[in-house]
Amino acid sequence: MNNISLDDLIRKVEKYNPEAVPMVMKAYQVADSLHYGQFRQSGEPYITHPLNVAYILADLHADQDTLCAGLLHDTLEDTKVTKEELTNLFNPEVAKLVDGVTKISKMPYYTKAELNNANTRKIITSVMDDVRIIIIKLADRLHNMRTLEYKSEFKQKENSLETLTIFAPFAYYIGAYRIKSELEDISLKYLNPDKYKEIEEIKIKTEHDSEKCLKEMLQTIQSLLEFENIPNEIKIRTKNIYGIYKRLEEGHKISDIHDLLSLKIMVDRIKNCYIALGMIHSQYHPINDKFKDYIYNPKTNMYRSIHTTVFGPEERLVQTQIRTFDMDRVASFGLTAYWEIKKGAAREEMQKELSEKLQFYKSLKDIDESLTDDEFVLKVQEEVFSDKIYVYTPKGEIKELPKGSTVIDFAYAIHSDIGNNMEKVIVNNEEVPFDYVLKTKDRVKIVTNMNSLGPNEEWLDIVKTTRAKKKIKEYKKENN
Ligand code: MN
């Protein structure tokens, strides 16, 4: 995989976007001559790095400007070329993307003390401007992580930590699961090699032990679907090593991780997802509380699928995931799936999805523009990059909130009127005080009353989110 040639890249691009080939060739030539005489720590000519980055992007079916920016992504930082020259050689879009990526690479992400917060803020805003910048940066980081063996041990650990705290979460927020999983696994391998090896062995053993059972189920389900003429593809999917590691860290036993192995069942359309679900439940006994419908109730990062855990052969518990082919592309590639699904309209569609559907974008937008740079960056770390909890509305919709959020945060996340008119709160059928801290899976119902007392000063100390604080202050201003 590391010996990608220009030919490999061109052949890949030709398959899905032949018109892009001449410009991609030109970008390669420009990058190659600008980086001439520079080498990577591995001893290879520097151009192998941008070439691999472009190849990862081509795998995602990236558009022409993104591919070119991938090839040129280190030229502004490491060579004499200027943004104006890139604009003249290519176009303003390519120059803007390269410039955006360059700014991110200068970000000293987690060393708070010396953080250049003004710059960090610029970067976060630029991501909101054009999501392709972060996608190129993720491809860049992925290739750097794949070739981390050539760096010093200190650099390996430092980069891995940075990847886990910043890049893997970003990949998750845009739904790019494959990139997220690979980034996490490589990071763990460098940060905790013993643990990594131990889990890897357990995983191989579990895969081996369950192979017969899963294959038998796969064939049964496949023939049932084929009997009904439903186009399908079924795959065995394993959890990534870091995913298992996190569950073990939380105190779970390996035998309790019921989705360590699962069957991924893909069909052509939504209607057939439910037909497949019926077939599976009639064939294998389901466990009631492990059933989830993320098709009509998607996760906050656009993930859609039906999950159901059933008793397979030999009474083994098996999780099945049922979804359409398009949903599967989104499940693996997130926002970047739009390059394939929406083709020419992808650019607008991605930005639209980002701003309308993705929770992390909304949280970013809520953060007050009048904050100082230091405060802004601190807020982003607290609210956007922090751990999350997931709770349900009375209608069963999922809401994502930062860990430590109270029922008041929840109320304001739904609507400011609900927060302002809160009278009592029911969590899992029991009334709770307003400072109740929510946990994942809580079902929350807010009872409102137009004559409620409304928010008071103390609420400001209880709430966690910027949105809630802002709305409470607004209410105070209007009602004084
Ligand atoms: Mn790079």
Image (tube, grey):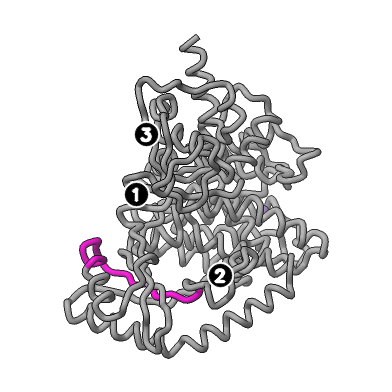
Q: Which residue is mark 1?
A: 396
The answer to whether 94 is drawn above or below residue 206 in the figure is above
- Residue at x 73%, y 68% (from the top left corner): 192
Q: Does residue 90 appear anywhere in the picture?
A: no
Left or right relative to 333: residue 2: right
Three-letter code for the amino acid on which mark 1 is drawn = Gly
Few, some or many residues within 10 Å of mark 3 (<14, 14–19, 20+): some
- Quadrant location of residue 185? bottom right
Task: Check disc 1 and report its element: helix, strand or loop.
Answer: loop
Question: How far is the residue under mark 2 from the one under mark 3?
Answer: 41 Å
The answer to whether 476 is drawn above or below residue 425 in the figure is above
Q: Which residue is mark 3?
A: 447
Three-letter code for the amino acid on which mark 2 is drawn = Asn
Q: Earlier in the sequence, mark 2 or mark 3?
A: 2
Magenta stretch in the rendered image: 260-274
Q: Position of residue 399 (x, y in %)?
A: 43, 45
- Residue at x 68%, y 30% (from the top left corner): 375
Q: Position of residue 288 (x, y in %)?
A: 34, 67
State which mark lies toward you, 2 or 1: 1
Q: Which residue is mark 2?
A: 240
Q: Position of residue 52 (x, y in %)?
A: 60, 62
Please say whether residue 269 is one of the residues in the magenta stretch. Answer: yes
Q: State which quarter of the image contains the N terminus.
A: bottom right
Left or right relative to 362: residue 217: left
Left or right relative to 2: residue 115: right
